[in-house]
Image (spheres, coloured by chain):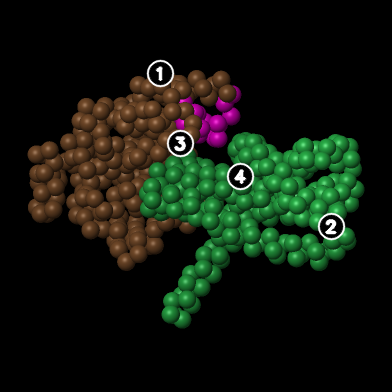
Chain colours: A green, B brown
């Protein structure tokens, strides 16, 4: 039993090492010309713009649910007036970044894993290389960079639509005015609430892009392998996002203690 | 013949996958402008040999020369100039399935030439016309038959007018008529444009039709090399069986 567990730990560490090297290679190649701007723009569109409907709808729904839950809790203490503040801070600091990252990992991570996996097993990646194109730079670097670029933007969209969703719920339940809601929502918010929490989503984007590209780019075993790459992309990026979030929150609290106020 | 008359040279090349030795100290040369066919049973390393020639796979031992340049020591980023001179037709065609057939052919032109967009499209149309697909520019690869996909992939492989073309199983999965059409395209390239062909095939009638020189791989070794007539006279049991089975087929 001990041997089995230790062998699994070694396999896990070896895998983590390989993915880390893959990610470092992506960073190094991103800095080295020639730059694949055309493909990068296409990926920003695919990863970013096409995720906007999902993020908007989800943000709206989360905002409404958060508002209703906050009301039921805060009502007991007669603190309903705090609902906009609580909702805005929790959306911007925590829920927006994490939920947006999990949604993107589901939509984009699975897509990248399946797309690159499909290209690998049908020899399209070899075909790119045979046409004198650096497949790593063209396929991997552009996807990782696109994820890094769009994640803070999608997070902002998520947080904002969540706050708007909260407003709708509040105005229906309590008739709170638009101006008063947003005054209260942003009265306690400072840049240290928004900037670190949103910028750390670049790390989330890097994780989504790197892990799913790694799994897709190294797919083996035909259609079954493609399915495995797609599923694993979602599972592993989700776990890594949640674990990384704990670490990043700790770092943010350490670096920006004033944001706790 | 002098070495510079050979555009491809393999010297003592070995390659293994896991414990399986796929190629063991294999050496051969391909003359400029010739049509060279590599034959052998499945799993004897034919496709591996082709992939070694453009650095898609690295050998464990030995040297590979393309037009007098040794490619075995090159780093990944040094390979593109060599690859521009070598077209590769994959067994599965390997067309990019998210873009149209015409865009597949235009892809290498956009990457590696300074042509204007109009010139690129005209050139891609011309290449598709050469393979009889002039009306399929806007169709997606998934909408084409197997033979049409192969021809589209051939048009893409020829987009940069490479002096060398590597072809992996051109007749795999195709009916005899379509297979003969592909053979005729390859022969025309060889005779009209002096393109050096290296063709991996199981199909011996096709190899007889195309090949100036044939090479038979068996268990990682070259067991015969020569013209089709010379191979017919071979006393090696496997070569004889192979050639006979082909004649029957």
Query: Pointer 3 and pointer 2: residues touching (CB < 8 Å)?
Result: no
**What is the number of the mark on residue B211?**
none
The location of residue B89, given as percent across then percent down, is 37, 38
Tell me the residue that label 4 is attached to: A142
Extent of the magenta region: B102-116
**What is the number of the mark on residue B135?**
1
Judge if badges 1 and 3 mark residues of a common chain.
Answer: yes
| Disc 4 crowd, CA 10 A, few/some/many (<14, 14-19, 20+) | many
Tell me the residue that label 2 is attached to: A77
**What is the number of the mark on residue B96?**
3
CA gap, disc 1 to disc 3?
18 Å
Query: Pointer 2 and pointer 4: residues touching (CB < 8 Å)?
Result: no
Host chain of mark 2? A
| Residue farthest bottom in this picture | A2
Judge if badges 3 and 2 mark residues of a common chain.
Answer: no
Which image quadrant for residue A153?
top right
Nearest to viewer (mark 3 / mark 2):
2
- Residue A5 colored magenta? no
Instruction: Compare residues A258 and B109 and report the one nearer the observer.
Output: A258
Host chain of mark 1? B
Residue A177 in view here: yes
Residue B198 in view here: no
The location of residue A83, given as percent across then percent down, is 82, 49
| Residue farthest top in this picture | B135
Host chain of mark 4? A
| Disc 1 crowd, CA 10 A, few/some/many (<14, 14-19, 20+) | few
Q: Is residue A39 left or right of residue B162?
A: right
Q: Residue at x 53, y 53 (%)?
A: A233
Q: Residue at x 77, y 55 (%)?
A: A73
The location of residue B64, given as percent across then percent down, is 39, 53
Judge if badges 2 and 4 mark residues of a common chain.
Answer: yes
Nearest to viewer (mark 2 / mark 1):
2
């Amino acid at each position: 039993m001990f041997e089995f567990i230790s062998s699994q730990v070694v396999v896990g560490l070896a895998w983590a090492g390989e993915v880390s090297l893959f990610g470092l290679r992506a960073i190094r190649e991103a800095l080295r010309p020639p730059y694949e701007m055309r493909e990068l723009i296409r990926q920003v569109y695919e990863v970013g713009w096409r995720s906007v409907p999902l993020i908007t709808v989800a943000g709206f729904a989360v905002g409404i649910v958060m508002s209703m839950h906050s009301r039921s809790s805060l009502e007991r203490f007669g603190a309903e007036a705090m609902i906009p503040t609580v909702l805005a801070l929790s959306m911007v600091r925590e829920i927006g970044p994490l939920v947006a990252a999990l949604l993107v990992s589901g939509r984009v991570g699975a897509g990248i894993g399946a797309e690159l996996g499909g290209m690998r097993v049908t020899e399209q990646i070899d075909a790119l290389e045979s046409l004198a194109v650096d497949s790593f730079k063209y396929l991997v670097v552009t996807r990782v960079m696109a994820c890094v670029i769009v994640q803070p933007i999608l997070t902002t969209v998520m947080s904002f639509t969540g706050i708007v969703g909260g407003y709708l719920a509040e105005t229906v339940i309590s008739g709170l005015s638009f101006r008063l809601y947003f005054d209260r929502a942003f009265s306690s918010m400072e840049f240290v609430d928004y900037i670190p929490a949103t910028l750390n989503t670049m790390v989330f984007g890097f994780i989504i892009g790197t892990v799913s590209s790694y799994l897709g780019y190294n797919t083996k075993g035909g259609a079954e392998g493609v399915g495995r790459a797609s599923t694993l992309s979602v599972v592993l990026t989700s776990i890594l996002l949640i674990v990384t979030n704990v670490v990043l929150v700790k770092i943010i609290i350490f670096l920006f203690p004033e944001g706790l106020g | 013949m002098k070495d510079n008359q050979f555009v491809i040279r393999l010297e003592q090349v070995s390659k293994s996958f896991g414990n399986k030795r796929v190629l063991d100290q294999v050496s051969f040369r391909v003359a400029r402008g010739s049509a060279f066919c590599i034959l052998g049973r499945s799993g004897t390393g034919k496709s591996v040999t082709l992939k070694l020639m453009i650095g898609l796979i690295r050998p464990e031992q030995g040297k590979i020369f393309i037009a007098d340049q040794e490619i075995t020591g090159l780093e990944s980023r040094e390979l593109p100039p060599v690859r521009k001179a070598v077209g590769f037709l994959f067994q599965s065609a390997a067309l990019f399935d998210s873009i149209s057939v015409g865009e597949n052919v235009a892809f290498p032109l956009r990457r590696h030439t300074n042509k204007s967009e109009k010139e690129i499209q005209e050139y891609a149309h011309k290449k598709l016309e050469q393979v009889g697909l002039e009306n399929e520019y806007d169709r997606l690869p998934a909408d084409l038959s197997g033979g049409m996909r192969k021809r589209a992939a051939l048009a893409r492989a020829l987009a940069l007018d490479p002096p060398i073309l590597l072809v992996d199983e051109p007749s795999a999965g195709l009916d005899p008529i379509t297979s003969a059409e592909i053979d005729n395209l390859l022969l025309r390239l060889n005779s009209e444009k002096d393109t050096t062909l290296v063709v991996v095939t199981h199909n011996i009638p096709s190899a007889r039709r195309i090949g100036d020189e044939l090479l038979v791989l068996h268990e990682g070794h070259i067991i015969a090399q020569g013209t089709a007539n010379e191979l017919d006279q071979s006393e090696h049991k496997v070569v004889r069986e192979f050639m006979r089975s082909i004649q029957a087929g």
